[in-house]
Amino acid sequence: MSQDKIDIKDVTAKTYNPKTHKNKGDRFNPSNRIYVRESKGAFQQLRRYGGWFLLLLFAIIPWIPYGDRQAILLDIGQQQFNFFGTTLYPQDLTLLATLFVIAAFGLFFITTFLGRVWCGYLCPQTVWTFMYIWFEEKLEGSANKRRKQDSGKLTSSLLWRKTAKHVAWLAIALVTGFTFVGYFVPMKQLVLDFFTLNASFWPVFWVLFFAACTYGNAGWMRSIMCVHMCPYARFQSAMFDKDTFIVGYDVKRGEDRGPRSRKADHKQLGLGDCIDCDLCVQVCPTGIDIRDGLQYECINCGACIDACDKTMDRMGYEKGLISYTTEHRLSGHSTKVMRPKLLGYGAVLLVMIGLFFVQIASVEPVGLSVLRDRTQLSRENDLGEIENTYTLKIINKTQQNQQYQLSVDGLGDVSWYGKQTINVAPGEVFNLPMSIGVNPGNLSSPVTTIQFILSDSEQFTIAVESRFINKL
């Protein structure tokens, strides 16, 4: 019998750092909340400036005037979607579908290349959460101070500071609700009607609804939204590969971790560069320990990188113990930036962007639709003509009053009963009932294909096909 030993695989459960949330049984319990410590550095400065820029852009756009209305107004009630000098209608919403596809493939491309940087730098949940945390720090103190205060008795001073914090949070939430609804309802009128108690039920409901969502998400739920409710955290693994740039900890350089004096030679002590200060955990908005390896909760915000780099600086060690890196680079292999999956996402993204601009260029300044009278195929009028009745719908998609000329082609000499010259206001849907009479001798078949032609003062022409029925 062979005496060879069988290799045994160590399947001992990994012990996580007890200071991370993974050790806690109920992460929805408010007593287990994550107290995020402030982190300063290049990546946090980039995130902060980017967040403030997007917040200001979001808040200012509904107040930008264009002519006699807002520059951007998505008027669902009137079914008009105004973007400066362009007005889109429901029949133009293929543009919106194309825009969603562009956003999806843009997200796929960025995630494959740079991981979850959208979550860490641009996601509204992250931007609002960090803004709420900023107010929390200014009014209640640092993370350690807040943790100590919340575990003790509620003093009058703490009550006043907590009240001020929640007032600030609610004010931000209310402004957010107004701003969001202001993209769909004229902003100036909305604010005026709201505070004079003249607003109708639905605008008030949606303002308060989005204010409550903002307050709850950014003030209370925070990482719960990112970890448990956001689908992006779940399907991102389908886009990651070993060449995706992630926030990673260099195990070879950092282990064995442990505290030491600045003057001590940690190499002689058998220690790595990590001094086990746990700052990377304390600044993490989702409360993970990046030293445990790649985790789906990581939002690539870079807070742990800035915190670790400062520690390395103080210790006199090289920066980059935690950095934006790839799994291949961490394992000692080279990173391939240009790879088939990334190029594929990029190619589809470029094609969809091109298609979007082609669609924009092909948007017509006027819409024409033709409806035949279905109650009567045709009739003979007093002049002995075969007459068909139609309803023409003309939509003026421009921002100016327009005069249109109407005609019909495909029947030779016809009698037009109704207006042939009409004036249509900006955004108006003009319904024109009319009929066409034709001498029976000019009709060679029971059904004739015709075209209704509309032209404007700028020589723009649009033709819509219909049928003329020669049946009594």
Image (cartoon, grey):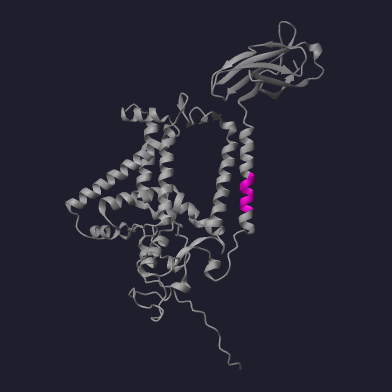
Q: Residue at x 46, y 73 (%)?
A: 253
Please provide percent x and percent y for residue 459: 67, 20
Q: Residue at x 49, y 79 (%)?
A: 10
Against 341, residue 63 (above or below) is above
Whether residue 227 sits left or right of residue 374 in the image: it is: left
> Where is the N terminus found, in terms of image quarters?
bottom right
Segment tinted magenta in the rendering = 344-351
Q: Is residue 147 magenta?
A: no
Pick the residue in front: 5 or 54: 54
Total marks shown come to: 0
Please provide percent x and percent y for residue 258: 37, 75
Q: Residue at x 62, y 31 (%)?
A: 363
Q: Is residue 230 visible?
A: no
Outermost residue to the left? 156
Name the main secondary structure of what is drawn in magenta.
helix
Please provide percent x and percent y for residue 284: 39, 60
> Where is the C terminus found, in terms of image quarters?
top right
Q: Is residue 48 visible?
A: yes
Against 177, residue 19 (above or below) is below
Against 189, residue 56 (above or below) is below
Pick the residue in front: 422 or 134: 134
Pick the residue in front: 78 or 62: 62
Whether residue 206 sits left or right of residue 76 in the image: it is: left
Q: Is residue 346 magenta?
A: yes
Please provide percent x and percent y for residue 173: 35, 42
Outermost residue to the bottom? 1
Whether residue 408 sits left or right of residue 235 in the image: it is: right
